[in-house]
Image: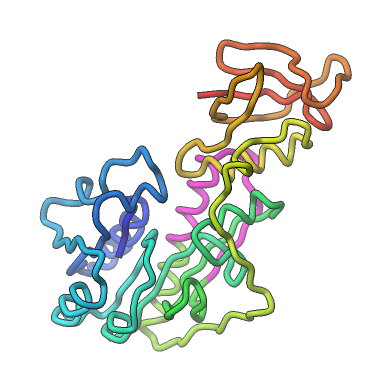
């Protein structure tokens, strides 16, 4: 169950490695993938021509009977923006599972990158049993690693892809072996809602490390980070610290470049690359 191609590829690559058959791909109507990348082509256009695909927003009345008729061993979701109802969760032999890019129970919800935006120094991923509420089921596998040195949106995306693939490899094997997983501790849970428009606008008076982390978190699937300089607002592709020639007030423009600016951040100069 998918709405975004990278999620499907994780599962398809795993299935191919082990000789499993994907009997059905369920996806919401065209446009749901815009939650992940507004510039992506409609998800169904990138699927293999021989894939069996069900496009529906009616999970109980349409998807559930079709899935039940196929009697799958596993139902796996990755980048699927809908709650999966009990009528589907009870069908597969070994259960229904979700790949989630956070170290659950931290970062439940549609925007796990928020953990990094708000100060996390690690990147996490998990495979968990799917329950009636988002991201609450027992965890079958989890990964957590330090932020990459080459910190930007694509680097975070690559690290998440690697860890999610590892979680699926380990967690699916445990599920088939009958492992119930480890229940999540509600006292350690946190929610990760979407960014607001105000949060997408970068405060250039913050320290360089804070700005880099926030730009990377905002730009995982597509550039969302914004700055406002010289009376206009632009999209930030990347940002990194540079040596200081002389101290200036935070927020001061030090140099204008064809592809952006050098600005004095809270602790040192910041090179900003714009779209």
**Res 216 → quadrant:** top right
* Position of 268 relative to 97 (above/below): above
Residue 227 located left or right of residue 175:
right
Seen from the viewer's position, the closer of residues 254 and 15 is 254
Residue 157 location in percent, x, y?
49, 47
Is residue 213 part of the magenta span, yes or no? Answer: no
Residue nearer the viewer, 17 or 82: 82
- Residue under the point 63% across and 56% down: 115
**Residue depicted at 32% across the width and 62% down the height:** 11
Q: Give the residue furthest to the front.
A: 231
Question: At which x and y percent is residue 82?
Answer: 37, 66
The quadrant holding residue 273 is: top right
Magenta residues, start to end: 142-165
Residue 238 place in picture, x, y as percent: 59, 30
List the single residue furthest toward the right. 247
Q: Quadrant of residue 253?
A: top right
Specify whether 167 is left or right of 205.
Answer: left
Q: Is residue 137 above or below residue 159?
A: below
């Amino acid at each position: 169950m998918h709405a975004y191609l990278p999620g499907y590829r994780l599962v398809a690559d795993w299935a191919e490695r082990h000789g499993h058959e994907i009997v059905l791909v369920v996806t919401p109507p065209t446009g749901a993938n815009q939650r992940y990348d507004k510039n992506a082509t409609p998800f169904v256009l990138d699927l293999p021509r021989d894939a069996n695909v069900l496009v529906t927003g009616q999970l109980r009345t349409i998807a559930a009977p079709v899935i039940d008729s196929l009697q799958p061993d596993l139902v796996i979701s990755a980048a699927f923006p809908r709650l999966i109802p009990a009528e589907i969760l009870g069908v597969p032999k070994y259960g229904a599972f979700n790949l989630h890019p956070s170290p659950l129970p931290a970062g439940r919800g549609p925007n796990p990158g928020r953990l990094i935006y708000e100060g996390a120094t690690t990147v996490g991923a998990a495979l968990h049993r799917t329950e009636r509420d988002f991201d609450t089921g027992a965890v079958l596998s989890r990964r957590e690693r330090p932020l990459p040195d080459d910190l930007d949106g694509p680097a975070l995306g690559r690290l998440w892809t690697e860890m999610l693939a590892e979680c699926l490899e380990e967690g699916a094997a445990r599920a088939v072996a009958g492992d119930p997983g480890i229940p999540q501790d509600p006292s350690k849970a946190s929610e990760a809602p979407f960014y607001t428009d105000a949060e997408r606008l970068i405060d250039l008076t913050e320290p360089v490390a804070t700005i880099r982390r926030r730009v990377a978190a905002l730009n995982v699937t597509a550039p969302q980070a914004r700055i406002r300089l010289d009376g206009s607002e632009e999209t930030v592709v990347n940002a990194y610290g540079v040596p200081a020639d002389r101290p200036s007030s935070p927020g001061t423009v030090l140099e204008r470049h064809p592809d952006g600016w050098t600005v004095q951040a809270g602790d040192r100069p910041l090179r900003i690359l714009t779209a």
